[in-house]
């Protein structure tokens, strides 16, 4: 834990440590750099970032780096390790810590949670909207969806717990429904994802789909129930 100190009448904590090189390389999709890190120290395969709790596998999933994900899974990366919640700077510097920055509480999200949360970025939406009139936007959209499917298939093939819940009580299926990822929902259902798990708000995946009026997803879930 990092020590804090008083400065100008307030409590100041040092900045968080830099990200683990293996995690950064995985997120960047730099397979060569990641290979060198793991060759030097194989124990970094499942290293967890001290601030976020991210592993290289989680970082690769967040970055949508399918080649890196497959590489890490081939090395038997632990798919059950979970991330943590980081503290925002204003909370990190508050006096309630008595001069010591505590460890971040558990977010409890596995690589599958992050894979199911993937959606289009702002840049993706802009490119799709601009290029849609000449059909390139549609092709980009389909390519992004294909990448998400391949990533989900790779993670699901690893033996990850499909019904694991995070600190909000959400499973991967909850997040896929929230994000209208109807191309991912069938993959989760094929792996026996439960449709009746309630999150901290008391909602099942079907409740979410009905509330958001995602008819096609609602029908998929009803058939699977």
Image (cartoon, rainbow, N blue to C red):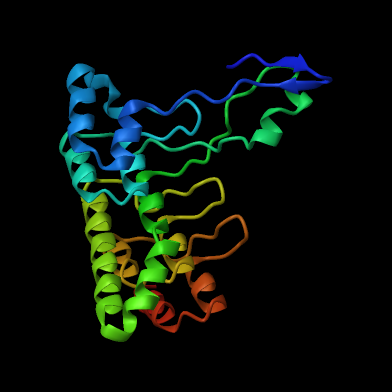
Q: In this rendering, is residue 199 above or below 222?
A: above
Q: In this rendering, is residue 164 above or below 206?
A: above
Q: In this rendering, is residue 78 above or below 165?
A: above
**In front of the other: 75 or 196:** 75
Q: Quadrant of the N terminus?
A: top right
Q: Position of residue 22 (x, y in %)?
A: 30, 29
Residue, x 34% and y 33% (percent of image)? 23
Q: Quadrant of the C terminus?
A: bottom left
Residue, x 41% and y 70% (percent of image)? 126
Q: Position of residue 139 (x, y in %)?
A: 24, 75
Q: In this rendering, is residue 14 above or below 19?
A: above
Quadrant position of residue 111: top left
Can residue 79 be seen here? The reply is no
Residue, x 40% and y 77% (percent of image)? 217
Left or right of 22 in this view: 18 = right
**In front of the other: 114 or 32:** 32
Can residue 148 be seen here? The reply is yes
Left or right of 160 in this view: 107 = right
Q: Position of residue 216 (x, y in %)?
A: 39, 82
Residue, x 35% and y 53% (percent of image)? 115
Quadrant position of residue 2: top right
Q: Count every numbered label the image shows and give the total.
A: 0
Left or right of 54 in this view: 100 = right
Q: Position of residue 47 (x, y in %)?
A: 35, 26
């Amino acid at each position: 834990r990092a020590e804090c100190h008083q400065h100008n009448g307030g409590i100041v904590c040092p900045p968080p440590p830099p990200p683990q090189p293996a995690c950064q390389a995985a997120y960047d999709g730099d397979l060569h750099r990641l290979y060198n890190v793991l060759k030097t120290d194989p124990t970094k395969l499942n290293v967890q970032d001290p601030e976020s709790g991210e592993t290289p596998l989680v970082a690769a999933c967040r970055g949508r780096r399918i080649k890196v994900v497959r590489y890490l899974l081939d090395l038997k990366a632990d798919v059950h390790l979970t991330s943590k919640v980081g503290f925002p700077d204003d909370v990190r510097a508050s006096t309630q810590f008595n001069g010591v920055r505590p460890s971040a509480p558990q977010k409890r999200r596995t690589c599958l949670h992050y894979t199911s949360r993937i959606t289009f970025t702002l840049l993706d939406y802009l490119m799709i909207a601009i290029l849609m009139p000449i059909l390139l936007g549609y092709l980009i959209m389909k390519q992004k969806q294909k990448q998400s499917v391949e990533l989900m298939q790779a993670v699901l093939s690893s033996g990850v717990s499909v019904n694991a819940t995070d600190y909000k009580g959400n499973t991967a299926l909850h997040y896929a429904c929230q994000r209208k990822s109807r191309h991912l929902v069938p993959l989760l259902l094929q792996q026996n994802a439960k449709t009746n798990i309630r999150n901290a708000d008391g909602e099942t995946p079907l409740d979410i789909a009905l509330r958001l009026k995602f008819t096609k997803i609602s029908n998929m879930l009803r058939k699977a129930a």
